[in-house]
Image: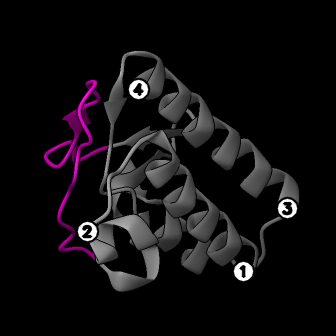
């Protein structure tokens, strides 16, 4: 299999460096920056939605089924994913924005470095 979930890759490796985590997370941030620049928020960012292409060493973000276009109104999203990666605003029913994806990214980064 060429593409595997990023966390599965981490589990398969006997050891991996902070530098490799930094490289992968930089790619995720670049993808988020692109989405946010296009006024789209992912809203379901979690480890299962980050796939590593082992041939190219590229992380791909998948499952944009929950993604929403950011408009002028207060967008409220419902979360049905893993609680450990859901941002507080989704859990509490408050308006969401690009900061919602950044919370999930931070949780993924934290889990990657543990």
Question: Relative to residue 71, is residue 109 depicted above or below?
Answer: below
* Spot occupied by residue 24 in the image (x, y as percentages of width and height): 65, 46
Q: Residues under labels 1 and 4: Cα distance?
A: 33 Å
How far apart marks 2 and 4 lie (CA) works out to 22 Å
* Residue labelled with disc 1: 14
Q: Indicate the secondary structure of the residue bearing disc 1.
A: loop
Q: On the rendered structure, is 61 left or right of 34?
A: left
Q: Circle 2 sits on which residue?
A: 93
Contact between marks 2 and 4 (CB within 8 A): the answer is no
The reply to whether residue 104 is in sight is: yes
Q: Nearer the viewer, mark 1 or mark 2?
A: 2
Q: Position of residue 69 (x, y in %)?
A: 23, 28
Q: Give the distance between the C-alpha atoms of the residues marked 3 and 1, in whole angstroms.
A: 14 Å
Could you say where residue 13 lies in the image, as x and y percent from the top left? 65, 74
Which mark sits nearer the N-terminus, 2 or 4? 4
**Secondary structure of residue under mark 4:** helix
Q: Compare marks 3 and 2 and give the one earlier in the sequence.
A: 3
Say which residue label 3 marks. 18
Q: Which residues are magenta?
A: 62-81
Classify mark 3: helix, strand or loop.
Answer: helix
Residue 22 sits above or below residue 38 on the image? below
Question: Which residue is found at the position 17% from the left and 74% from the top?
Answer: 80
78 left or right of 87?
left
Q: Mark 4 or mark 3: name the one nearer the start of the chain.
A: 3
Name the image quarter holding the C terminus. Answer: bottom right
Task: Please state which of the two labelled residues, at mark 3 or mark 2, is closer to the viewer.
Answer: 2
Q: Where does label 4 land, which residue?
A: 35
Residue that extends furthest to the top in the rendered view of this protein: 38
**Secondary structure under the numbered disc 2 in the rendered image:** loop
Q: Does 79 lie within the magenta span?
A: yes
In this orientation, which residue lies closer to the viewer: 50 or 79? Answer: 79
Q: Which marked residue is nearer to the observer: mark 3 or mark 1?
A: 3
């Amino acid at each position: 299999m060429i593409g595997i979930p990023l966390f599965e890759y981490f589990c398969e490796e006997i050891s991996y460096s902070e530098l490799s985590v930094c490289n992968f997370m930089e790619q995720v941030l670049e993808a988020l920056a692109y989405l946010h620049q296009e006024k789209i928020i992912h809203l379901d960012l979690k480890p299962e939605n980050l796939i590593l292409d082992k041939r190219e060493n590229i992380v791909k973000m998948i499952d944009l089924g929950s993604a929403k276009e950011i408009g002028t109104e207060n967008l409220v999203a419902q979360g049905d994913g893993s609680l450990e990666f859901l941002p507080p605003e989704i859990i509490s029913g408050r308006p969401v924005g690009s900061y919602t994806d950044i919370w999930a990214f931070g949780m993924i980064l934290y889990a990657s470095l543990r």
